[in-house]
Amino acid sequence: MSRRLGVLIAVLALTSGVLLVSAVLLCPVNPRIGIQDVPNGLALGLVFWIVLTIAGASLAVRMPGGTVVDVGFAPLVAAMSLGGPVVAGLVALLGVTQSRELRREVPWYGVVANHVGITGPALIGAYVLNVVPNRGNFIVDFVATAGAAGLLFALNILVTALLVSTHSGEPIRKLLRADSGALITLLALAPVAWLMAQMYVIAPWSVLLFAVPLYTTRLAYQRFVEVREMFTETVRSLAEAVDKRDTFTSGHSHRVQEISVDIGKAMKLSDSDLEALEWGGLLHDIGKIGVPDSVLLKQERLTREERMTMNAHPVLGAEIIAPVKRLAPELPIIRHHHEWFNGSGYPDRLVGDQIPKLARVLHVADAFEAMTAARPYRMTPLTPEQALAELRKFGGIQFDPDIVDAFVKTKWARELPDPGRAEIRDVPLIGQAAGTLSAMAGAPGADAPRAQDSPHPSPAIA
């Protein structure tokens, strides 16, 4: 545990403790929490809601972004509505106990963080709810409970993101947005929680009827995670299947994905752009599935017709992915990752900023990975220093120099001697005059290193 994380947990624990002690001293327990007409009704009512919350917390689902959600939120809010701050604090403190904590699978500071991360927000929400007047009116009580639940939820998410960010170094904004859609739907449990509280006052046993909708909600989250994981595994398997057609390119797409995302982080791109680079990195060569082995695996110089076949793979890849709406942001990356900054790339001979930014990012990552890996037509790969020199040399010609600047800041090049930006020569925009010749002759790129008749110098790529 880092010092910063320890200090943060200590501050949160102290704050939650002060709030709980203040609630015990200043806020009497609302008798509505008690089970009527039985001895020790208040204590039994408290235990009842703690047990329900523990049951809900035990059905936790880990979302793709790493956040854990569970339906224990509903009984916690119901207990808060019924009993006030003291009950809310105790139910939150004890109700989030999970079996993995009892099995000591979570370090002690993780247990403390999990408990104080919900106890403080629950107490603050309960304090706010406790000062709302006219709660005897059903409408007022419903609105107030929903508002307090929203406050509890927002504070809990913020505290959790702060803890995870301090522990992992991930930006808080990214953590807050990673599972925002799924987490916001959790607020739909607030009306259910209010209804649970109303039914409890009439007949405590009737609350058990809510087990079915709560479990159904949990299943919905589980299905969401399973479907996304299946989608992810399918994409990865598809990318690996393409790479493994050639033993020299096995793992190529995964490495390009890693380099692309690192460049994106150096450029401070948005979370959605980083995700597009992840998928785009995996799928950028998916069109090669339609390239015959006689062309794809050929070690000699490609003929004009073979080059045309090879250069069609970005368009074919985009056509393959187009029906998958979930991958729409990746289409420009797949189609344009072989465009050159001076307009001599393919398939559309775009120039400069006409090339989608993420395609320019991936082009740099693709080239660096290819240059530093062995290929049948070049068994000795370039060293990382040599590859960086090539990226710099052809910045403004083949590569966007700003993207190369960002690449230099990543772990892949940070320790390498940087020759700096090359002097940009007055290279004609041959996309209009000789673009067709360049594309067919093999514009140097991750899969087109064998051409020697390009009208401008050829970097030693791939």
Image (tube, helix red, strand yellow):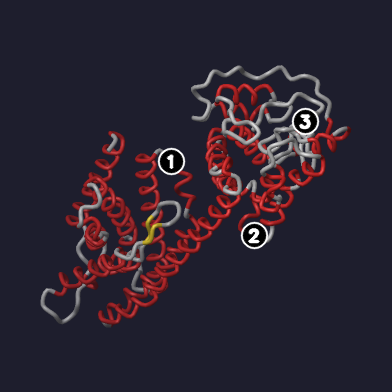
Image-based side of 271 in relation to 364, left or right: left
Q: Which residue is drawn at 64% across and 46% down?
A: 284
Q: Mark 1 or mark 2: which is in front?
A: 2
- The relative height of residue 213 versus residue 286 in the rendered view (above or below) is below
Q: Mark 1 points at which residue?
A: 170
Q: Mark 2 points at which residue?
A: 325
Mark 2 neighbour class, 10 Å CA radius: few under 14, some 14 to 19, many 20 or more: few
Secondary structure, mark 2, is helix
- The relative height of residue 130 versus residue 106 in the rendered view (above or below) is below
Quarter of image, res 50: bottom left
Mark 1 neighbour class, 10 Å CA radius: few under 14, some 14 to 19, many 20 or more: few
Kindly report the distance in space between the C-alpha atoms of the residues bearing marks 3 and 1.
36 Å
Mark 3 and mark 1 lie on one chain; the one further toward the N terminus is 1
Secondary structure, mark 3, is loop
**Viewer-side residue, 341 vs 4:** 341
Q: Which mark is residue 342?
A: 3
Q: Quadrant of the C terminus?
A: top right
Mark 3 neighbour class, 10 Å CA radius: few under 14, some 14 to 19, many 20 or more: many
Residue 16 horizontal/vertical position (percent): 25, 49
Name the amino acid type tagged 1: Glu
Q: Can residue 85 be seen in this view?
A: no
Q: Quadrant of the N terminus?
A: top left
**Viewer-side residue, 82 vs 210:** 210
Q: Residue at x 67, y 27 (%)?
A: 460
Q: Which mark is residue 428?
A: none
Name the amino acid type tagged 2: Lys
